[in-house]
Image (tube, rainbow, N blue to C red):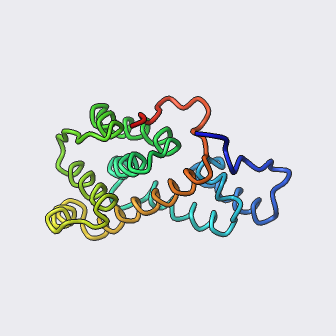
Amino acid sequence: MTEDRLAPIPESQWTAAQRECAQEIIDGPRGAVLEPFIPLLRSPELCTHAQRMGEYLRYRSAIGLRLSELAILVTARHWSQQVEWAIHAPIALREGISEAIVHAIGLNENPQFGQADEQVVYDFSRQSLEEKQVCDATWVAAIAHLGEHGAVDLLGIVGYYTMLSVVMNGARTPAPAGARMALPKL
């Protein structure tokens, strides 16, 4: 990766709209303006809407944190997105996704799942990204495990983290300083 195209804007240079957006992020569960929002802050209205959607999808989705973290890792691997991987791989481990699964996803290999809901989320996420649709069998399995609300939230998670990945890849946003887990290069 080369130089960050949209490096952090010094707080003293924020516009009123940027300050309002940043404060909403700081006052929320994230507690700080993290890497995904650094490039987005150039468009305060987009950033505000994106962070609100992300707050719901990350912290309150119908599928819960363990499964949403799995979907985020699949999306990060698909887009080779170092920031999302660095942030979410440790959270996925903490939430109960096995180290073997995280490692396999990082290497773009098919993990061995012990839990059916994890297999469904993995298949659903991969198909959404790679095939641009979800096959009937995977859809039926997702509805059985997650319900319609969960399936829609899962689509939202994959779409939202795709948007963040595209923004950060375009901006060349570097992974957080001191990140413990780097996404393997393929």
Residue 4 image-quadrant placement: top right
Q: Position of residue 56 (x, y in %)?
A: 48, 61
Residue 113 image-quadrant placement: top left
Question: Furthest residue to the right?
Answer: 12
- Residue at point 45%, 58% (across, down): 162
- Residue at point 52%, 57% (across, down): 166
Up-down relation of residue 7 to residue 143 (above or below)? above
* The C terminus lies in quadrant: top left
Q: Position of residue 98 (x, y in %)?
A: 29, 34
Please indicate whether residue 105 sits to the left or right of residue 170 in the image: left
Please indicate whether residue 79 sits to the left or right of residue 101 in the image: right
**In front here: 17 or 105?**
105
Q: Position of residue 14 (x, y in %)?
A: 81, 57
Up-down relation of residue 40 to residue 9 (above or below)? below
Up-down relation of residue 160 to residue 174 (above or below)? below
- Residue at point 16%, 68% (across, down): 136
- Residue at point 36%, 38% (across, down): 106
* The N terminus lies in quadrant: top right
Tally of marks: 0
